Image: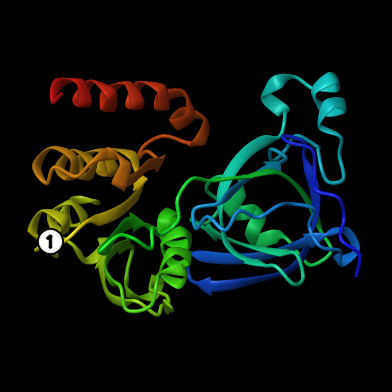
Amino acid sequence: MSQPEPNRKGSAIRAEVVSAETVTPHMRRVVLAGLEGQPLPIEFSGLTDAYVKLVLPRPGSGVSEPFDLDEVKGSLPAEQWPVLRTYTIRAWDAQTGRMTLDFVVHGDEGIAGPWSVAVEPGDQVQFRGPGGGYAPDPTADWHLLMGDESALPAIAAALEAMPTDVPVRAFIEVSDPAEEQPLLTAAQAQVRWIHRETSPRPPGVELVEAVRELEFLPGRVQAFVHGDADVVREIRSHLRFERRLPAADLSISGYWRRGLDDEGWRAAKREWKAAVAAEEAAHA
C-alpha cells in the first residue's frame, strides 16, 4: 500500500471512520484511517500525549461532512462555525497508518462525545495535528502519572511505553468502577483507581490527597499530571514547592475546567497560566 505524503503543517486532514465502539459506559473508542482506508498522512512522533484537534460541526448548524471550512466561514455567522476539540491519540498503528481516539461521553452534553456515539464506519471527519510534548523518560528512576478520564488515554499510552521494570505510581479518577479499563505495561506499576461517585468528598480532592500521602521512591521522578485545571494546579504546586521537583521533570496541563465548556476554558486558560507563572515567581 502506497504511503500518502505527510500533510502541510497546520492544514486539516480528512479522515474516515474505520470503527466505533463503547469501551466503558462513558468512554467511546473511534479508529480513523485515511480516505478509502489509506494510511493517514501524518508523522507520528511517538509522544504518549500526542493529540489532534478534530474539526466538528455544531449541532443545528446545517453543516455536515464533507465540508470546506473556509467556505463555511464565508457563508455562516461565527456562532455556527465548526469547533475544534482536542483529543489524545490513544494508539497509533504504524503498519496501517490508523489512529485510535477515546472520547469521554456524558449523554447529550457537549459536541465531541455525542459525535463519537453517532458516528459510523465510512463517516468522515477533519482534524489538525498531531502535537504533543511528553513521553516517559527512560533515564528517570521512577514515574508518577495522575489524572481523570480526560487524561486516561495518555496515561494508558504512557504505561504501554514505560521501560521494562521501571517503578510507576499511577492515580486515576473516574466516576465509578465500571469506568476502569485494563492497562498494559511492562513496568512495575501500581495503579490506584479513585471513584468520584462513591466519594463523600468533592471531585479531585482524593486525587490531591493521594499525591500528598504518597511515599516518594528514591531517585529522580518524572511526573505527568493532566485533567481538571484546578486539581492539576493544586497537584503542581505540591510537586514544585513542597516536593521540590524541577519543572523540567513535570508534564502539567489543564485539559478542562469544571463548570466551563471547551470555549469557556480556552478563554480562561491564559489567566490560569498566568496564575501558575505567578506561583513560580513567588517561590523563586
Q: Residue at x 29, y 75 (%)?
A: 189
Where does residue 209 sit, x and y in percent of width and height? 12, 55
Where does residue 175 sit, x and y in percent of width and height? 33, 63
Quadrant housing residue 118: bottom right
**Which one is nearer the viewer's eye here, 131 or 212?**
131
On screen, residue 182 above or below 148: below
Q: Residue at x 51, y 58 (%)?
A: 105
Where does residue 1 sit, x and y in percent of width and height? 90, 70
Where does residue 49 sit, x and y in percent of width and height? 49, 53
Q: Amino acid at mark 1?
A: Phe
Specify whether 256 is left or right of 93: left
On screen, residue 197 above or below 85: below
Instruction: Name the residue tied to disc 1.
Output: 216
Point out the image quarter for the C terminus: top left
Residue 202 in view in this figure: no
Neighbourhood count class around disc 1 (C-alpha, 10 Å): few under 14, some 14–19, many 20 upward: some
